[in-house]
Amino acid sequence: MSLDDELKANGMLTVDELISGQPIDGFVANAGVVNLSTFVEWLDMRTKEMLTIKARMLLDKNDENDLFEWVLAHSAAFNEVRVNLKKAMKS
């Protein structure tokens, strides 16, 4: 059985369905992101926010906190998107 079949059998959306967009996307999208420039601003803001929280947690020796892995993952994900977007924009 394929992953798509297993997901559907369990009442879930497939990965392709999730990527293609869902009605909830309108609630998740930031209202201030209206073009590429504002997307870069939003991405910089979110990356800075996550890196700041990560740094504070490390300095406070709070890396055993249950949320630390969440912050670590989000800071890495935002930064990866940010680095690759800025690289693409230079092309």
Image (cartoon, rainbow, N blue to C red):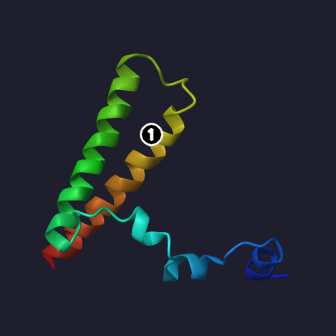
What residue is at 51 percent from the left and 41 percent from the top?
70
Residue for badge 1: 71
Question: Which is nearer the eye, 4 or 90?
Answer: 4
Percent x, y for residue 22? 52, 77
Frontmost residue, 48 versus 27: 27
Q: What is the crowding at mark 1: few (fewer than 14 residues within 10 Å), some, or many (at least 20)?
A: many
Mark 1 secondary-structure assignment: helix
In the rendered image, residue 74, in percent from the top left (x then y), is placed at 43, 48
Q: Which residue is drawn at 49% across and 79% down?
A: 21
Position in image of residue 58 (x %, y %)? 39, 24
47 to the left or right of 69: left
Q: In which quarter of the image is residue 27?
A: bottom left
Viewer-side residue, 90 vs 46 = 46
Q: What residue type is labelled 1?
A: Val
Provide residue 83's location: percent of width, then percent of height: 27, 60
Which image quarter: residue 14? Answer: bottom right
Give the vertical position of 54 relative to 79 (above or below).
above
